[in-house]
Image (cartoon, rainbow, N blue to C red):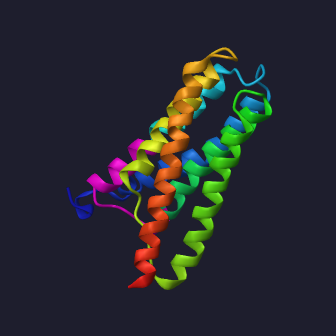
């Protein structure tokens, strides 16, 4: 389906979903701060909606051929903000380990810095499957951390799998950026 065949509001739906996800970050944060030590069905629902919109907005943008510069910047930003806020607050509540927080925030800081270096040079590193898988697993694991009692191990195992994949994806992005800079 071409972009011309879409109505203007429908063509903007992917970006609207991204904006919704950005707007959900403070809602999620308030719900989690008011939670029972990091256990919150309401926060999990908001976080789950954010995870679903992450999948839907990208799918629709690609399917309808309405990818935009705004979406290319705002979509990963919305993901990073939602996940980073969740990891930070869940660490604060004692639900996630400090090392996981440091790795996730560190990786995102490196990626943000790298994007700032590459963008002025006209270079763009595309999201890879490992990065997408890491995001999916992090969304799912954090969702389950929010729903399960403190000390439940399996969501933490999933979280660590997501962290490892996030690091691997970050390394792949760095290698791709290095290749692009050498051209």
Q: Residue sitting at 67 percent across and 14 percent down?
A: 149
**Nearest the camera: 134 or 28?**
134
Image height check: is 97 above or below 40? Answer: below
Q: Give the extent of the magenta segment.
A: 54-70
- Does residue 61 show up magenta in the picture? yes
Q: Is residue 64 left or right of residue 140?
A: left
Main SS of the magenta part reads helix
Write down the quadrant of residue 36 in the picture: top right
- Residue located 69% across and 31% down the image: 96
- Image coordinates for residue 173, horizontal then vertical, percent: 46, 63
Task: Please count the marks in the image.
Answer: 0
Q: Quadrant of the C terminus?
A: bottom left
Q: Nearer the viewer, residue 101 or 28?
A: 101
Residue 75 coordinates in the image, percent (x, y)? 50, 55
Q: Residue at x 68, y 17 (%)?
A: 151
Please say if 95 is above or below 1: above
Q: Position of residue 80 (x, y in %)?
A: 59, 51
């Amino acid at each position: 389906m071409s972009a011309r065949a879409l109505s203007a509001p429908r063509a903007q739906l992917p970006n609207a979903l991204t904006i919704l996800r950005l707007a959900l970050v403070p809602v999620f944060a308030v719900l989690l701060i008011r939670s029972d030590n990091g256990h919150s069905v309401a926060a999990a629902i908001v976080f789950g909606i954010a995870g679903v919109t992450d999948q839907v907005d990208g799918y629709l943008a690609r399917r309808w051929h309405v990818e935009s510069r705004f979406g290319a910047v705002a979509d990963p930003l919305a993901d990073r903000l939602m996940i980073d806020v969740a990891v930070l607050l869940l660490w604060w509540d004692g639900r996630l380990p400090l090392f996981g927080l440091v790795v996730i925030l560190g990786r995102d800081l490196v990626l943000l810095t790298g994007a700032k270096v590459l963008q002025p040079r006209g270079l763009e590193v595309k999201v890879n499957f490992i990065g997408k898988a890491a995001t999916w697993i992090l969304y799912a694991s954090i969702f389950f951390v929010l729903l399960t009692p403190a000390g439940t191990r399996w969501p933490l195992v999933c979280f660590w799998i997501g962290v490892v994949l996030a690091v691997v994806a970050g390394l792949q992005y760095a290698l791709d950026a290095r290749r692009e800079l050498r051209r």
